[in-house]
Image (cartoon, rainbow, N blue to C red):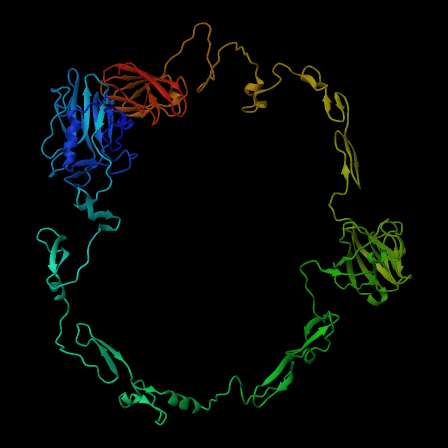
Amino acid sequence: MTDSRNIGQYSRLHSNPAGSGLVDGVDFPHSGILKAMSVGLQNSYAILNGTTADATKNFSIVQTDSSGNTQFVVRAGRIVRDGKLMPEISTSTFTQGTPSSFDEPTSGNAYFLLVATNASTNVLAIRGDKATVDVVPQLETGDIPIAILRLDYSGTVDNRSIQYLTTAKSENSVSIGFDAGSTTYTEVSAITGTNEGLFISGIGTATVQGADKVLIQDTDATGVNDVIKTVTAASIAALAPQGDITGITAGTGLTGTDLTGPVPTLNVGGLTVAELAANSLQISSESFANNDTSLMTSASIEDKIESYNYTTNVGDITGVALTAGTGIDLTSVANATAGAYAATIAVDVSDFMTNGANDRVLTATGTDGINAEADLTVGSGVIGINKSLVLSVAGATDFEPTVVNAIIDKSNNTSTTANNVINLPTAASVATRVFRLKNIHASTTLTINTANSNEKFDNGVNSNDTRWNSALQIELKPLESVLLQAVTDGVSIARSDTNPGTNNGAYSLTPGYLILDTVPKEIGDIESVVAGTGLTGGATSGVATLNVIGGDGITANADEIEVAVDDTTIELSASSGSGTVRVKDGGIATAKIADDAVTGAKLANNIDIAGTLDVTGITTLDNNLIVSGVTTLRANVLLKTAAFSATIAESGTVYQLTNAGAVVVTLPANPTIGCQYVFVNVNGNDMVITPTSGDIINGTVNNTENNTTAYAATSCVCVVGGGTAQWLVFGGI
């Protein structure tokens, strides 16, 4: 296939006319060029109807091989005939041998003219006869030449020479001038086309007379609309609406100009109240009438406004007295009854708050009462808290928590001991209280003291616990908590000296605090680490260390574990990073090898196989296969009855084509070098071998080869692989 693109000029005679224009010594001024010039002088020629890059326009010709004959596909284009642009001529196809006179000669070259025929049809046609060689044929009446086609004896059917006789004309204007003397051309007007329509320059001006003529486009012209004709100015004026008024006079309140002309002008001027119609205007001396048929003077409007007791004073509300109510204070009151009334209004908090000091909580004391509380007290009700309650405590201060699980936040912890201390109140005064104290900080110890020296924690027992400094003090480490209950004198408890909570003795407490529960650091829930099989070490606190136990066949070093077992199973040994692995015969079952676990990197470079190698599926070789001895290879044979595309996986296949008619066989895209196929045309019908778009067959892009011989075999071999593949196609074509 050859794309013989038209670029809109008299081209060279070549399969690629776009390569250049006429070439000296090659494109002689033959009669075809002169005939095209003669017709062009009559203002008839072919033009471009698209960009030169558009292969679907401009009469561009594509040549293909059609069963051994040249097929010319002439794309759509446009012509100018006698200066008039004709409608687009659609795509046409011409095939060598149809008619029989349109064919290559038995020797030499036959020349044919591609023309647009007479004005009544404006279709493409071929002029010429193969019997007349080396002569450009004559034009018929009305023919406009487009291109010369050369059919050379035994030429390549899809690579014939073409010479375009077209132009790239893209606009047309008319200049009108006269000889101003000494053969000097002087332009007085020009007619040009614009994107908005026709433009005419140099039009003079004139005083319009009734007999003057005006150019119009007659929409009612017989047979043809929009024909340019002339009409007198008087006839156009006569089309204006006509009346029976014979004169105009300016009356009362009106003045006029040019009252006798065709278009008089009247103006309202000097109109007074007295000149208005009776009952159309209300004045101040008249009673007000509420209607939509009369107007009011300014004096009557003022009278009506003042009748509603409005004043002309600016910006004052009169007759209004302000009285301070609950929560409102009035100050700086002035002109309360007249003039510029002024007052300052402020909210009086003292009217509804009995305590207005800082840092108070507002509470309702009734339907309309609010109070500021220093201490928030809840009556018989219950405070529900669905989140952790955080109580902020500043400095060393008595603290009286009333809510179980309250969290004590010592947010001002510093190096000063006092800031890390909470002094509890006297236990006897809060004997019913149960609460939890928690040290939420990650690095600071919180100290909890009883109020009096005679008050103790758990009656002073368990003082040897490292968490308690003495019977009077508890130290909470970071993230520890304790649940306390204040008790009175004489409360009996049962517990052990060394393990709080066990029933191992009874004590009668002095006033103090009973430790109900203690929680250590809330970091995790692992109580101890125990060494299992093969390990030593462990711990119940701090950091636990585990070590591997050495033994028979096992040596544990700082950075490796060495295992030595007898030769009947597996031996693993290492020394300075090297060693051996040995497996006994049959020591690894098939079930112990995972799928795809043995890669090429794990096999020797040279592998000898004793016996038969049975491979199921496709075997792909990255390089040459060298076989010693007798080798039996069998080609794959496939039967095809219709068009199909060969695949890379089918390389080496022999295809039998038994199609009943013409068929297209497509070679694969992105083939690898060495891909090859054999196509056998069994019935002798047209078999077209075509590449993937952009690939090359026998040196030509998108070339096709035809096999039309029964039982002829055509071979295809890929010699350049990849995205732009190259094929050698031979035999049977």
Q: Nearer the viewer, residue 372 or 22?
A: 22
Q: Quadrant of the N terminus?
A: top left
Q: Nearer the viewer, residue 22 or 320?
A: 22
All told, the count of numbered labels is 0
**Residue at the (38%, 90%) spot, across then down:** 300
In the orientation shown, which residue stands out farthest toward the front? Answer: 182
Q: Is residue 95 left or right of residue 644?
A: left
Residue 9 x %, y %: 24, 32
Q: Nearer the viewer, residue 503 or 45?
A: 45
Residue 443 x %, y %: 78, 49
Does residue 494 appear in this view? no
Location of residue 342 with respect to 541 vertically, above or below:
below
Q: Is residue 115 left or right of residue 586?
A: left
Q: Quadrant of the C terminus?
A: top left
Q: Nearer the viewer, residue 353 or 161?
A: 161
Residue 644 x %, y %: 31, 25
Which image quarter: residue 63? top left
Q: Is residue 254 left or right of residue 632?
A: left
**Residue at the (26%, 88%) spot, across then down:** 277
Location of residue 286 with respect to 652 vertically, above or below:
below
Does residue 398 appear in this view? yes
Q: Is residue 490 left or right of residue 334?
A: right
Location of residue 469 with respect to 588 vertically, above or below:
below
